[in-house]
Image: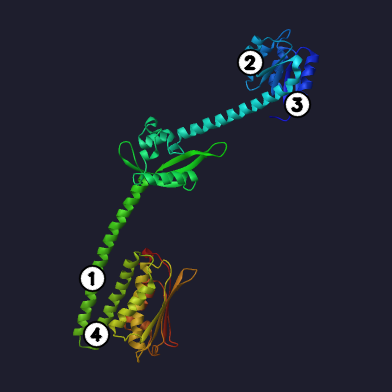
């Protein structure tokens, strides 16, 4: 209600009009008035002044209250009209009220005019608020009806009170077949009756907001939905039921199952490839081992052992890929330990005489880098085992790091006797160092640096490069 309401008075007697104003002002001190005596002025002020309420006499010389009432009902139906008249019989009063007047006040009982006006304005506000609420409900109803998302309204017992067209389209049930029944009529194929009750209880408490369901259409076809739950309450805050909105995830569920099936198939294929390749590598290592046993010359045996260790290095990479199921996250520390243990067996190193220190784990270390690095580590460790420790004891360290510019550094260090000064590793005619330089500069596009202080330290630096650019 406006704090300063506006009133239009239709009255031909000035003293009566003033009496009406005085009575109304006693209830609404800040109100304003327009007083008219005839039809043209009344119609004009109704349009321009836009009053909150109209007070009209029933009988005027050229116009009457009933005509004014009918005009207002057509052109300003939300404006209440109160008849203020000197005399009116009961039949006329009933006719006026039925026509649309909100009240009537006799001039000899003007003391009740203030209350009548106040009541009329309050009822007007209630009427407008109710209409606004109805418009909002109508708008919301239209949105729900036209929504492509299935919507269900349930009471506190889980009984369906409403479903929108999208729901009927999804489930193939029409509204008459589903309203009055529980949602589990079509939902929760894999959920027991007790579980349904617990879900409803959690939803009404507000503890459960969303859940996936396996459902069945009227035709028997299985479909899957993600249901979102929201409680709806009355004006006093009491929970009256649930609004459920559904998202059809059937295709997503099928896609996920297809992916899982494909992954299982690929895993089986990977296992088969791994076992076949691993068996072939073990056969190669065994054949080389047989040749070592048959060889007479030490030089021939060393060549065969080196070939054997190189196959072992490749096998270590292959084994780590299988264990981790990744071509881009190879644990190079594990590969290095595998190579070291294989070389210890090959060169019959007594356990504990030569130790290994490894710090070689970096993120996203892929096959394109790991394979040449493994062969380099194999060559350098084998060189150290064969030449650095005449007394058969020492420590070999392997480090792999990466900096902010994506430059990688591979370091293989021993604390042995060191490379003789008269030996130039870069121009060596031995297979080991030649292979190290070839892999470091050819495949890794890197550099090699050798330090002879306190043993031998080989440092190789290179950048990450995509496979297609590297090979």
User: How dense is the environment of label 3, judged by Cα within 10 Å: few (below 14), some, or many (20 and up)?
Assistant: some
Q: CA distance from mark 3 to mark 4?
A: 119 Å
Q: Position of residue 45 (x, y in %)?
A: 71, 19
For label 4, the SS is: helix
Residue displayed at 36% across by 34% down:
173
| Mark 2 or 1, closer to the camera | 2
Q: CA distance from mark 4 to mark 2?
A: 122 Å
3D distance between C-alphas at marks 2 and 3: 24 Å
Local packing at callout 1 (Cα closer than 10 Å; few below 14, some 14-19, many 20+) is few
Say whether residue 410 is visible: no
10 Å neighbourhood of mark 4: few (<14), some, or many (≥20)? some
Name the mark nearer the viewer: 4 or 2: 2
Tell which of 426 and 109 is nearer to you: 109
How far apart are labels 3 and 1 at the CA level?
103 Å
Residue position for label 1: 279
> Which residue position holds label 4?
301
Q: Which residue is mark 3?
A: 27
Q: Are marks 4 and 2 in contact (CB under 8 Å)?
A: no
222 and 383: which is toward the camera: 222
Of all residues, the one furthest to the bottom in this rendering is 391
Does residue 265 lie above or below 4 as drawn? below
């Amino acid at each position: 209600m406006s704090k300063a309401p506006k009133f239009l008075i239709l009255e031909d007697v000035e003293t009566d009009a003033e009496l009406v104003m005085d009575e109304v002002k006693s209830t609404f001190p800040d109100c304003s008035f327009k007083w008219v005596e005839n039809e043209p002025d009344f119609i004009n002020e109704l349009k321009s002044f836009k009053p909150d309420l109209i007070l009209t006499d029933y009988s005027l010389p050229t116009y009457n209250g009933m005509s004014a009432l009918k005009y207002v009902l057509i052109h300003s139906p939300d404006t209440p009209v109160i008849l203020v008249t000197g005399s009116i019989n009961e039949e006329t009063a009933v006719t006026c009220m039925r026509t649309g007047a909100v009240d009537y006040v006799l001039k000899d009982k003007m003391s009740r005019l203030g209350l009548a006006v106040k009541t009329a304005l309050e009822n007007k506000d209630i009427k407008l608020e109710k209409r606004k609420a109805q418009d909002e409900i109508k708008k919301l109803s239209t949105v729900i009806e036209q929504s492509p998302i299935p919507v269900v309204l349930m009471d506190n017992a889980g009984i369906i009170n409403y479903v929108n067209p999208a729901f009927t389209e999804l489930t193939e049930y029409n509204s008459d077949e589903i309203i009055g029944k529980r949602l589990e009529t079509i939902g929760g194929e894999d959920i027991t009756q007790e579980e349904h009750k617990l879900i409803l209880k959690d939803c009404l408490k507000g503890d459960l907001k969303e859940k996936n369901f396996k459902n069945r259409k009227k035709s028997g076809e299985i479909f899957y939905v993600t249901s979102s739950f929201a409680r709806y309450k009355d004006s006093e805050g009491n929970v009256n039921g649930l609004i459920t909105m559904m998202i059809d995830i059937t295709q997503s569920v099928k896609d996920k199952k297809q992916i899982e099936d494909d992954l299982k198939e690929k895993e089986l294929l990977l296992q088969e490839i791994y076992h076949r390749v691993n068996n072939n590598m073990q056969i190669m290592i065994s054949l080389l081992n047989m040749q070592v046993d048959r060889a007479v010359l030490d030089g021939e045996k060393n060549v065969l052992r080196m070939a054997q260790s190189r196959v072992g290095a490749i096998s270590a990479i292959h084994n780590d890929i299988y264990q981790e199921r990744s071509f881009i996250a190879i644990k190079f520390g594990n590969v290095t330990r595998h190579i070291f243990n294989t070389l210890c067996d090959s060169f019959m190193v007594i356990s504990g005489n030569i130790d290994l220190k490894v710090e070689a784990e970096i993120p996203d270390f892929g096959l394109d880098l790991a394979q040449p690095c493994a062969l380099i580590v194999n060559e350098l460790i084998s060189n150290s085992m064969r030449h650095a420790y005449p007394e058969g004891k020492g420590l070999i360290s392997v480090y792999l790091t990466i900096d902010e510019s994506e430059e990688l550094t591979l370091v293989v260090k021993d604390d042995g006797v060191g490379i003789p000064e008269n030996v130039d590793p870069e121009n060596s005619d031995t297979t080991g160092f030649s292979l190290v330089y070839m892999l470091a500069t050819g495949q890794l596009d890197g550099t090699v640096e050798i330090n002879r202080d306190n043993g031998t330290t080989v440092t190789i630096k290179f950048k990450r490069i995509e496979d297609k650019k590297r090979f």
